[in-house]
Amino acid sequence: MLHGKALGQAIDAAIQLKIDAGKIKSRSDVARTFGVSPQAIRGWVMTGSIAKEKIPLLWQYFSDVVGPSHWGLSESDTIFIQAGSGKMSEDTGADRVWPFSITKREDVLRLSPQQLQQLDLMIAAYLLGTQSNAPKSDGPIKTTAA
């Protein structure tokens, strides 16, 4: 996953591609979609710093003009993230692949700081996908006595 200035450049390029394709008119359209100010979008482009919770939406929003490799994601990263956004079986959740079952602690400890940052972003995306697919609740479940 890209980060820093490289991520800012990728965001800028994706915005321009979306404008060129006629899908949006300006950066303000991007700001409205993300619920931020146009200045925040400018900050993303300048610094490459974006809130982790906005990253999955970023990928989804620009998926019509750029693919995962645009964001520095590999095929395995994409599979990992998609596993986190899959629907769980209502009964057991057995169809959900949990990606950490074979991960050893010592393998994680050997990662470089950059690899740890990428792992952190992928886990955040995975968890956000899981949360977005959780059943919605309007409060406590009400039951009636039989």
Image (cartoon, rainbow, N blue to C red):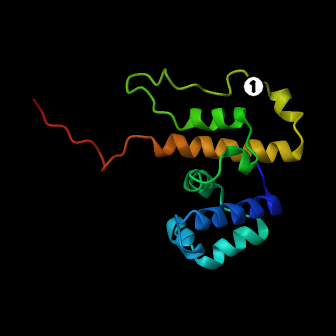
Query: Viewer-proximal residue, 44 or 115?
Result: 44
Residue 15 in the figure: left or right of residue 22: right
Q: Residue at x 22, y 42 (%)?
A: 142
Amino acid at circle 1: Thr
Q: Residue furthest left?
A: 146
Q: Residue at x 52, y 40 (%)?
A: 130
Q: Residue at x 61, y 51 (%)?
A: 59
Q: Residue at x 87, y 46 (%)?
A: 113
The total of numbered circles placed on residues is 1
Residue 61 in the figure: left or right of residue 78: left
Q: Position of residue 98 (x, y in %)?
A: 60, 26
Query: Viewer-proximal residue, 146 or 86?
Result: 86
- Category of crowding for the residue at label 1, using alpha-carbon neighbours closer than 10 angstroms: few (below 14), some (14–19), many (at least 20): few
Classify the position of the C terminus by image quarter: top left
Q: Compared to 99, does 46 lie above or below?
A: below
Q: Compared to 70, does 85 lie above or below?
A: above
Query: What residue would you read off at disc 1?
Result: 103
Q: Residue furthest front?
A: 21
Q: Position of residue 27 (x, y in %)?
A: 60, 73
Q: Secondary structure at mark 1?
A: loop
Q: Compared to 97, does 132 lie above or below?
A: below
Quadrant of the rendered image containing residue 44: bottom right
Q: Position of residue 15 (x, y in %)?
A: 64, 65
Quadrant of the rendered image containing residue 115: top right
Query: Viewer-proximal residue, 86 or 146?
Result: 86
Query: Viewer-proximal residue, 44 or 28?
Result: 28
